[in-house]
Amino acid sequence: MQAQTVGTEPPAVGRRSGSDLPESRTDAARRSIWTGRTKRTVLQAAFWAALLTLWQGLASLYGPEILPGPGQTALGGWELLADGTLPGYVGISFTRVLLGWSLGSMIAIPLGLLIGRVETIRVFAEPFLNFIRFIPPIAFITLFLIWFGIGETSKVMLILYATLFIVLLNTLTGVLSVEEDRIRSARTMGASNWQIVRHVVVPATVPYMFTGIRLAMGTSFMAIIGAEMIASNEGVGYLIWNSRLFFRTDWIFVGLISLGLMGFVTDRVVALLGRRLLGRYGVVSTGSLRR
């Protein structure tokens, strides 16, 4: 009698079980993400290494009096950190920027919605907006010092001005970009003007608002540095301007790097809040908010 082999049939060549395929795809996706992150990290590290090398080379060429190297700048930064000068000045400048930027944004967004929705107001406002937006904030420093004094009010008002028109114009652009079909559809279903603004106009305008807010942040830092250089004895702008008297170019670089870090951190926080708010309104986040 011929013996029978007990066992399961061997799988056909090239056949994969159903449970293996999803796992394989998941592993491939994870490897792809890891490879992308690793590549990005390596490229960024290479860029900064090349930049520091170039910086050190130029510093050796021109001398520390003209261009301090990374090491000398780090020592100068540690000196300012140790005596508390740098944290104090950074806190003062950041408080001024945050206050003026927040007030400007809170005023600009409702104004932009109002001008965008009311044609009569828009007819009168647009020529003025197109005129005033070409006047840089720095041009108003002297007037603001006369009007508001040399204290904190003039600096906050300068940043408010730097923020106001950028956010307002972006909000206005967002309102005008809302499709009329969507507004007519909402009105057909019995929505009031307030409901149209709340449920149709605002969600469609949020990406434009956050674009304006992020652009205004950069302008705010430029405005406060100019104001602190001219009319202040505190702040990062004052540090940069006053360092020339002591020929401390390393302190100047410390101030510049501090400004860059302040702006970078603030922009990351605003981008994070923007992504969450866009998700709340059901709007797909734009590339500018993902960066």
Image: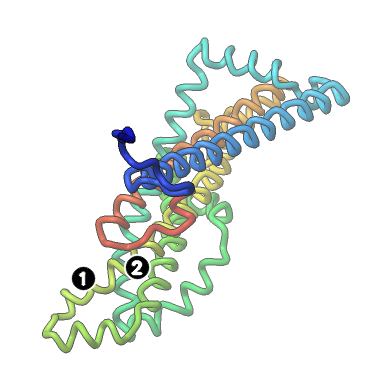
Estimate the x, y position of residue 206 in percent, counting from the top left. Answer: 34, 63
Q: Nearer the viewer, residue 240 or 109?
A: 109
Q: Which mark is residue 288?
A: none
- Element marked by disc 1: helix
Can the viewer see residue 100 in this picture? no
- Label 2 vs label 1: CA separation? 11 Å
34 relative to 187 in the view: left or right = right
Q: Residue at x 13, y 85 (%)?
A: 189
Estimate the x, y position of residue 97 in percent, counting from the top left. Answer: 43, 42
Estimate the x, y position of residue 194 in percent, counting from the top left. Answer: 17, 75
Q: How is the image coloured?
A: rainbow
Q: Which mark is residue 205?
A: 2
Q: Which mark is residue 199?
A: 1
User: Seen from this angle, which residue lies furthest right?
Assistant: 61
154 relative to 3 in the view: left or right = right
Q: Residue at x 58, y 34 (%)?
A: 41
Q: Give neighbour class at mark 1: few <14, some 14-19, many 20+ (Cα, 10 Å).
A: some
Q: Give neighbour class at mark 2: few <14, some 14-19, many 20+ (Cα, 10 Å).
A: many
Q: At label 1, which amino acid type do we have?
A: His
Question: Residue 227 lies in what quarter of the image?
Answer: top right
Q: Nearer the viewer, residue 276 or 43?
A: 43
